[in-house]
Image: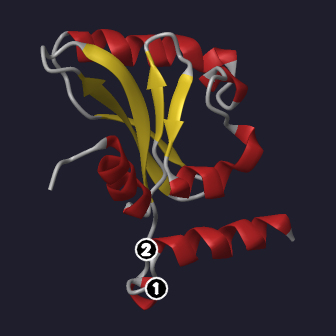
Amino acid sequence: MDITAEVLTGILDAYPYEIVFVDRTHTVRWLNRAARRRYGDTVRIGSSIFGCHNERTRPKIEAFLRRADLGEDEMFEAYNGRTGEREFFVPVRDDAGRVIGYFERHEVPWTREHAEEPVGDYWTGRAEAEAQ
């Protein structure tokens, strides 16, 4: 089997956490299915990540990129007290090791009684609760 763009897209779409890949110019270049479901029209391919993150986050993101350029990989970004998620900045590198972009990884909070709940169901339930 050849690993094609279609296969890679299928793998990343099967991943239940959102992936919004952003290039070095802070332009959104790709979203997986979970990201499209979670963010809807808020985040679009070809748009600036600062439509979702405000411009005040630019210095923080630029600092993460400088650290990534120096060799750091995944970096803790923040704890979101509203959602209970830990957020991480994840640089993406080309074959030569150069940072070509990044995405943000979220860890959802789990409790023992919800440990078996699929991530997609978790997001859907939370989105419905927030809409009410």
Residue 119 lies, in percent from the top left, at 47, 72
Residue highlighted by disc 1:
114
Question: Residue at point 48% right, 26% down?
Answer: 22
Tell me if residue 54 comes above or below residue 39 in the rendering.
above
42 and 30: which is toward the camera: 30
Quadrant of the image occupied by residue 99: top left
Instruction: Check the image and tell me how it is coloured.
Output: secondary structure
Tell me if residue 47 comes above or below residue 125 in the rendering.
above
Residue highlighted by disc 2:
110
83 and 52: which is toward the camera: 52
Q: Residues within 10 Å of mark 1 (few under 14, many from 20)?
A: few
- Residue 47 lies left or right of residue 74; in this view the side is right
Residue type beneath disc 2? Trp
Q: Is residue 82 visible?
A: no
- Residue 18 lies left or right of residue 132; in this view the side is left
Q: Residues within 10 Å of mark 2 (few under 14, many from 20)?
A: some
Question: Disc 1 versus disc 2: distance between alpha carbons?
Answer: 6 Å
Q: Residue furthest front?
A: 1
Residue type beneath disc 1? His
Q: Is residue 53 visible?
A: yes
- The mark tally for this picture is 2
Residue 24 lies, in percent from the top left, at 43, 12
Tell me if residue 95 comes above or below residue 1 in the rendering.
above
- Residue 75 lies left or right of residue 15; in this view the side is left
Element marked by disc 1: helix
- Residue 44 lies left or right of residue 96; in this view the side is right
Residue 70 lies, in percent from the top left, at 18, 10
Circles 1 and 2, Cβ within 8 Å, touching? The answer is yes
Give the quarter of the figure containing the N terminus.
Answer: bottom left
Element marked by disc 2: loop
